[in-house]
């Protein structure tokens, strides 16, 4: 998994795997979900991230 925040464009991208993107859909305004050929989620893109998240440049990672 990779998480990238581009401060200049204010876009946060969460890449869940390295599969090729076959289709993308904007399920909610400003949130784009990328899918592979088997309809698995490849990544999630959040536009205008600083208006939707309190601190898009800070990431906490927890494993249980």
Image (tube, rainbow, N blue to C red):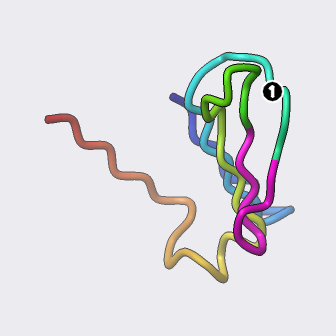
Q: Residue 29: give x, y in percent of width and height.
A: 77, 74
Q: Is residue 31 above or below residue 13?
A: below
In the picture, the quarter occupied by the C terminus is: top left
Instruction: Count the labels in the image.
Output: 1
The percent position of residue 6, horizontal first and vertical second, equals 75, 54
- Residue nearest the observer in this picture, 1 or 4: 1
| Crowd around label 1: few <14 · some 14–19 · many ≥20 (10 Å) | some
The x, y position of residue 14, in whole percent, is: 60, 43
Residue 41 image position (x, y, % from top left): 61, 35
Q: What secondary structure prevails in the magenta region?
A: strand
Residue name at image x 75 percent, y 55 percent = 32
Q: From what the image shows, is residue 29 above or below residue 2?
A: below
Residues shaded magenta: 25-34
- In this view, the residue in front, 4 or 14, is 14
Horizontal side of 8 relative to 43 (left or right) equals right
Please name the residue shown 71% across and 70% down the image. 28
Q: Which residue is mark 1?
A: 21
Residue drawn at (67%, 55%) of the image = 12
Is residue 60 inside the magenta stretch? no
Which residue does the image show at 77% across and 70% down from the upper left? 30
Element on which disc 1 rests:
loop
| Residue at the outermost left position | 64
Report if residue 26 lies within the magenta region.
yes
Which quarter of the figure has residue 49? bottom right
Q: Residue furthest bottom?
A: 51
Is residue 57 shown left or right of residue 28?
A: left
Q: Is residue 43 above or below residue 53?
A: above
Q: Is residue 27 above or below residue 53?
A: above
């Amino acid at each position: 998994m990779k998480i990238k925040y581009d401060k200049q464009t204010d876009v946060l991208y969460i890449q869940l795997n390295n599969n090729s993107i076959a289709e993308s859909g904007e399920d909610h305004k400003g949130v784009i979900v990328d899918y592979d050929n088997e309809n698995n989620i490849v990544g999630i893109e959040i536009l205008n991230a600083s208006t939707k998240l309190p601190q898009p440049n800070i990431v906490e990672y927890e494993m249980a």
